[in-house]
Image (tube, rainbow, N blue to C red):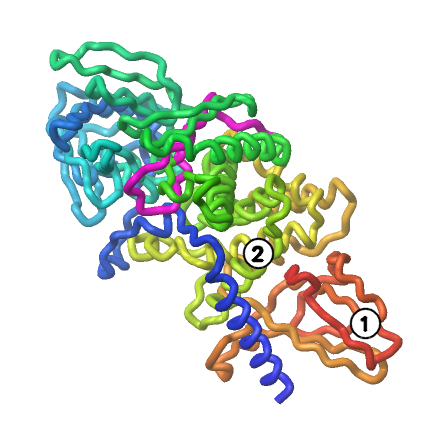
Amino acid sequence: MKILRKHLLLYTLVVLFGGNLADKSPFYNDALTQNTDFSQNENSIDFRLPTAIIPVSYEIKLISNLPDNFKFIGFVTIEALVKHPTNNITLHVGNLNIEEVTILEYKNDNFLTTYDNITEKFTITLPKIITEGKKVSIYMKYNGILSDNMLGFYKSSYLDEDGETKWLAATQFQTTHARHAFPCFDEPRFKANYTISIARNKKYKVLSNMPLINSKTLDPENKIWDTFGESISMPTYLVAFVISEFDSNYNTDSGTNIGVWSKPSTIEQTEYALNVSTALLKLYKEKFNESYALEKLDMVAVPDFAAGAMENWGLVTYREDRMLYDPKESSALAQQSVASVIAHELAHMWFGNLVTPEWWSYLWLSEAFARYFQYFGTAEIEKDWNMAEQFVVEQHQSALIVDGLESSLPMTREVSNKLQLEGIADTITYNKGASIVRMMSLVFGTDTFENVLRRYIENNKEEGLAQPEDLWIEIINELEIQNIPHIDIKKAMNSWTTRPGYPVISVVTHFSGQLSITQERFLLRNLDNTPKNIIWSIPITYTTQSESNFYNINPKYWMTTNRSSRNRIANPKEWVIFNVQSSG
């Protein structure tokens, strides 16, 4: 009965605090939580691309017909490297009509093309094997239609101050929607360089990831061709462009040319976003010991945008109410929403963009850090908002509810088809992931953990890809540099990231002063199904009535068995509080 009462107590606390308070927080869903449109009967199909050929660079040319119609014409040349001998080139093509395909090195050869409309794989089969180390140039001409579902390359509109409809085009490519704008290797591990040119009507302005380097009137219809500089290596889901009649404001105080864009009637409401982003770039540069990687950063308030925001490198897009703030009309909650969403998205410039999770299975390496700095980055520029306390209620406690279900999934999980990809952007990836990041910061110490993050970025930015193992290695290295004794870090952290759920700790105080401590998985219901053989590596923290020290969150020890005991108190009648500051 003692254990049952403890379970019921934990359940009550979680529901009351999570339900009553978290709902009052700014509601923020980023791109991943909003863009799934997959059917539910494809869970047995493998959607992964082969790795025999990998992209090196893309040259993308698009002709926009706005505002006359919503069709576009595209040309893409992909320079690719053969990693293993093959006669097949397989890439992704979405809702596009392919007009022409040429392999420039084999343009005199006949080849076959096939298309799977479920996996969206487009395969070119050559008559001869291409040997390892060779480069191939894949040229494709195609056409498409701007979508109206706020995914891929899509159209949007608004009414100007005269009541006239204004059309624009924007992109939303995460997770698998770049293929609807240009044929590509649409997986995060296939990072490449991009050179983008867009033809537009004279009244429009075009933005992309990189700065504009050239504008020429070359088209017989008198359109302007805008060409942008070659990007650094990045995955397809971060490519972006916006075609609009927006106005802008700029600030260079951070050392980066930051531009904020919106429809003309709301441009005065971009000042706060400009100030916040300037402060955050300075903060993150110092915190991560790594400058923002690009020359410029544009942020755009898009009238029709399904997500809260999207971290496109150099061109971050936002829902209007996540970027615009009117100090005369907007609420304090709206102001916090703007600041915290910008903090989230700009953290992605390092976690996700510079160092990209190798596959969606490790999405938390991007989203958990962004969600963490959504609070703790904001806390450093708006010090009166109690963001650390809000985190516990809005993120930590909400994660406890979801992770207390039998159906919960681990942070690191299998993602091999669209059904699994649909489920990856969940409370576990975001809220639990951020809570684990917070736990690491608290138990290892803030300074130590910031050194870990700096090492993680520095040692993985060249390849630009990472797995959880890379983070564990940097924790171990930093602890050893500081001569800090430690347990098996990989085993400890995997116990939290590779399995669902979390432990509940039961403590019995004996008259001798000894503490008997046990752990088991916590379940909100079906307690009879509680597994008995799962062990977490738990950083044990507690304080006593006589100590009353709620500031010391250094673990007394790490519990790595299902039972342990401690001799700790002179007066067994004193109260003992475990998990100080909800640090575990």
Which mark is drawn over residue 462?
A: none
Q: CA distance from mark 1 to mark 2?
A: 26 Å
Mark 1–mark 2 contact, CB under 8 Å?
no
* Residue that sits furthest to the bottom in the current view: 1
Q: Specify the quadrant that holds the C terminus.
A: bottom right
Mark 1 or 2, nearer chain start:
2
Which mark is drawn over residue 545?
A: 1
Please name the residue that numbered disc 2 is placed on. Answer: 390
Say whether residue 416 is magenta. no
Q: Does the rendering let one see residue 140?
A: no
In the displayed structure, 441 sits above or below 291; it is: below
Residue type pointed to by label 1: Gln
Q: Position of residue 461 (x, y in %)?
A: 52, 32
Q: How many neighbours does mark 2 have within 10 angstroms: few (below 14), some (14-19), or many (20 or more)?
A: some
Observer-nearest of 145 and 160: 160
Q: Position of residue 346 (x, y in %)?
A: 49, 37
Q: Specify the quadrant that holds the N terminus.
A: bottom right
- Side of 262 relative to 512 (left or right): left
Say whether residue 308 is magenta. yes
Residue mark closest to the camera, 1 vs 2? 2
Quadrant of the rendered image containing residue 291: top right
- Report the residue at 55% width, 45% height from top: 373
Q: Which residues are magenta?
A: 290-316
Q: Position of residue 265 (x, y in %)?
A: 33, 32
Give SS at disc 1.
Answer: loop
Q: How many neighbours does mark 1 have within 10 angstroms: few (below 14), some (14-19), or many (20 or more)?
A: few
Give SS at disc 2.
Answer: helix
